[in-house]
Image: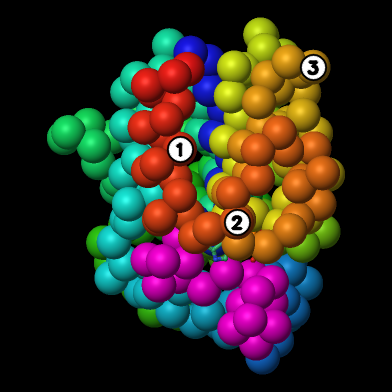
Amino acid sequence: MRVLVITGAGISAESGIPTFRGAGGLWRTFNAAALATPEAFQNDPETVWTWYRERRAGVRTAVPNAAHNAIVKLASHAREFLLLTQNVDDLHSRARWNGSSVTPDQLVQIHGDLFVTRCSRCTCSRRDENGDGTGVPACPCCGAPMRPGVVWFGEGLDPHSVARAERFVGDARADAVLVAGTTAAFPYIIDWARRAAGSSGRIIEINPDETQLSRFATTVIREPAAIAVPRIVDDLIANG
Ligand code: OAD
């Protein structure tokens, strides 16, 4: 079985991490959306860092839920597998099934990684999984301010990540495309899901609400991810 899984913030909702657009979503509270821009970082990097450190702290205390773990199970059973997530949290990496996890080559974080700290000028970067400093970190290579390794409004996607997604989608048709917990607000998400499925592959959407992808889905499951994903994964493994 060749499987593409696409996830968004909704898959981490049951782990206690806020989504972006729903009730209580990040983009609806104070001026979070205004902080996720290169301009905000230029004008006030301290405030941007404070906000991202708060988000890092929230993610560090969160644990993967049944949906994250079931996706690892699917990865272990699939012949070819890619997990394309818009999430910057690390719950997909920390998820386990039978002691195994998704491998780095099975995972693309298309909107970046909350725990990467990278230079705003050169290519220097590091991971800050365990601890955070204070203030605005300076690049050890060139001294410029370092920034969170996430994609902000108005920025392009990382070309290497796009190339990996394109390669998987372009190589061959996926038997199943599972899309869970995303509003699919970005056209490239819908495009990847549809192209991967081709004319005969299945697109299974798991989301309590209708999305822009819903009309292209062959199966729509209006349930929370932690309930529906484990069931769908078992069904895919049993029936292909
Ligand atoms: P959104 O916040 O836009 O959407 C979350 C989706 O999850 C909604 O469609 C909800 O209906 C659904 N949802 C909520 N609870 C759920 C649950 N328990 N199980 C399943 N689904 C649930 O988040 P994304 O679609 O991930 O980008 O947003 C995409 C991108 O927009 C994010 O990566 C972020 C944001 O701007 C960047 O930061 C670049």
Queried on whether the Cβ of the residue with tag 3 lies below 8 angstroms from ligand 1, the answer reads: no
Q: Which residue is mark 1?
A: 232
Question: How many other residues sit within 10 Å of disc 3, few (<14), some (14-19) or many (≥20)?
Answer: few
Image depth: mark 2 or mark 3 in front: 2
Q: Which residue is mark 2?
A: 222
Q: Amino acid at mark 2?
A: Arg
Discs 1, 3 touching: Cβ within 8 Å: no
Which sits earlier in the primary sequence, circle 2 or circle 3?
3
Between residues 22 and 187, which one lies in front from this camera angle? 22
Q: CA distance from mark 1 to mark 3?
A: 21 Å
Q: CA distance from mark 2 to mark 1?
A: 12 Å
In the image, the segment drawn in magenta is 12-29
Which sits earlier in the primary sequence, circle 2 or circle 1?
2
Q: Which residue is mark 3?
A: 199
Label 3: which secondary element: loop
Q: Amino acid at mark 3?
A: Ser
